[in-house]
Amino acid sequence: MRVGCGGEVSGEVLAEQLIRLRNSIDLLEVEFSRMAGDFAQTDEYDRVGYDSPISWIKDVCHMAGGAAADRVCVGRQLDQLDDSLVALASGEVGFAHLALIAHTSAAVGERLDERNLLKQATNLSVAEFRTKCMHAKHKADPDGFVDEEKQGVEARSLTLTNTDEGVVLVNGLLDKVGGAALRTALEPLAKRAGKDDDRLRDRRLADALVDLAMHALDTGLVPQRTHMQVTTSLETLLGLSGAPAAEMEFSLPISAKAVERLACDCSVTRILLDSDSMVIDVGRAKRRPSGPTYKALKVRDKGCVWPGCDRPATWTSAHHVVHWIRGGPTDLPNLCLLCYRHHWMVHEGGWQIVRTDDGRTLTIPPQPFGRLPRGPD
Ligand SMILES: [Zn+2]
Ligand SMILES: [Zn+2]
């Protein structure tokens, strides 16, 4: 790599320079923080129309809110943190460590055990040290710690916004425990389903959230409300060309493929066929395997039958290989268990699922438009 007047600089020298430069920046950050702390004592931010000194710094100094808050906090606590400043000047800890010590100091006041905290900071990464600071806060001020958690719960929020295209934007904030509960529930569901599963992690997490909702509805975990209800015409359900889209509560109109999947077993409680102004209510009885059939299906398939998928039976739907709307019977040979994702792949995704005579399941990927599946050579 070339720098300055063009001389080669070795990695070792660069490393040394980086460390020194970072230390200089950290010292400048301390200076910035001292000034930010002093600024927060004035009412200049108020005079120019901001609601807090942090909002002013964030906006005018082009910083993220958390970074601005860190600096104000460090500035306010500096007088209590002599040892930490010495450690920062000598490069033993960085500014991010100092900010965590300052926040802990702000929370626990005189009960701060700075020496002990500093000893840990010198050996830990910033992320690891954050956990230690939480423990220190709890040790010094358990009530304050509970208050902070309460504030976290009070701050919970979730907004679900329907866009004009019918896509739902999800935006939310959870406290520590609530967030951990959600992650504990989602993480196992968001694992790759087999070696061919190439979905990215955020897609898998989103799929997991939908699975969780479907599972809660399918197993009756949601009190009061029964289930999704779809209104469709017979032509739509049969996938005839020129048929209108189907309608579902809380959603813009949905495709024939989606309604075919939802109607395949019990994902919707009622399907109202609205053809020629005639409404026929198709209840679960027609679509859902009877108790003994369903038991036998669970014993036979155990879980999702897609090769490589390990989703257990409780997280699956009973798929009709020949759809009931086309005369497929709701009995064992015409049924198989598919998890929500693989059920989607069969209906909307255009995959075919074939059961061989010896009980194995084969999957055939969707064929490009106009090309027929290849037969055996
Ligand atoms: Zn199905
Ligand atoms: Zn599956």
Image (tube, rainbow, N blue to C red):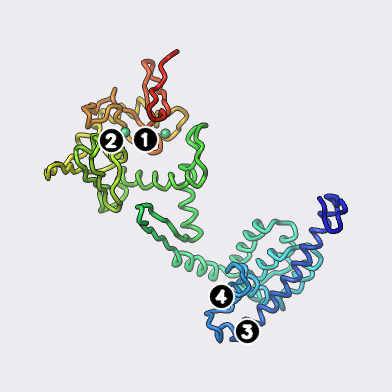
For label 1, being within 8 Å of ligand 1 is answered yes
**Left or right of residue 3: residue 158:** left
Quadrant of residue 68 within the rendered picture = bottom right
Above or below residue 32? Residue 338 is above
> Does label 4 or label 3 sit earlier along the sequence?
3
Q: Residues within 10 Å of mark 1 (few under 14, many from 20)?
A: many
Q: Secondary structure at mark 4?
A: helix
Q: Choose the circle earlier in sequence order: 2 or 3.
A: 3
> In this figure, which residue is indicated by the disc labeled 4?
55
Residue at x-position 21% and y-position 45%: 231
Q: Tag 1, which secondary structure?
A: helix
Question: Which residue bears the numbered disc 3?
Answer: 41
Q: Residue at x 58, y 75 (%)?
A: 54
Among the 4 quarters of the image, the one containing residue 320: top left
- Give the spatial CA distance, label 1 vs label 4: 49 Å
Q: Earlier in the sequence, mark 1 or mark 2?
A: 2
Q: Is 300 in front, or is 142?
A: 300
Amino acid at the residue labelled 1:
His
Asked whether mark 2 lies closer than 8 Å to ligand 1, one says yes
Task: State the CA–CA distance, disc 3 to disc 1.
Answer: 61 Å
Image mark for residue 264: 2
Q: Are marks 1 and 2 in contact (CB under 8 Å)?
A: yes
Q: Mark 4: is the Cβ under 8 angstroms from ligand 2?
A: no
**Mark 3 Cα shell of 10 Å, populated few (<14), some (14-19), many (≥20):** few
Amino acid type for the residue under numbered disc 4: Ser
- What crowding class fits label 2: few (fewer than 14 Cα within 10 Å), some (14-19), or many (20 or more)? many
Mark 4 closeness class: few <14, some 14–19, many ≥20 residues within 10 Å: some
Residue assigned mark 1 = 343
Q: In the rendered view of the protein, which quadrant contains the C terminus?
A: top left
Q: Which amino acid, mark 2?
A: Cys
On the image, the x and y values in percent for residue 202 come to: 50, 47
Residues under labels 2 and 4: Cα distance? 53 Å
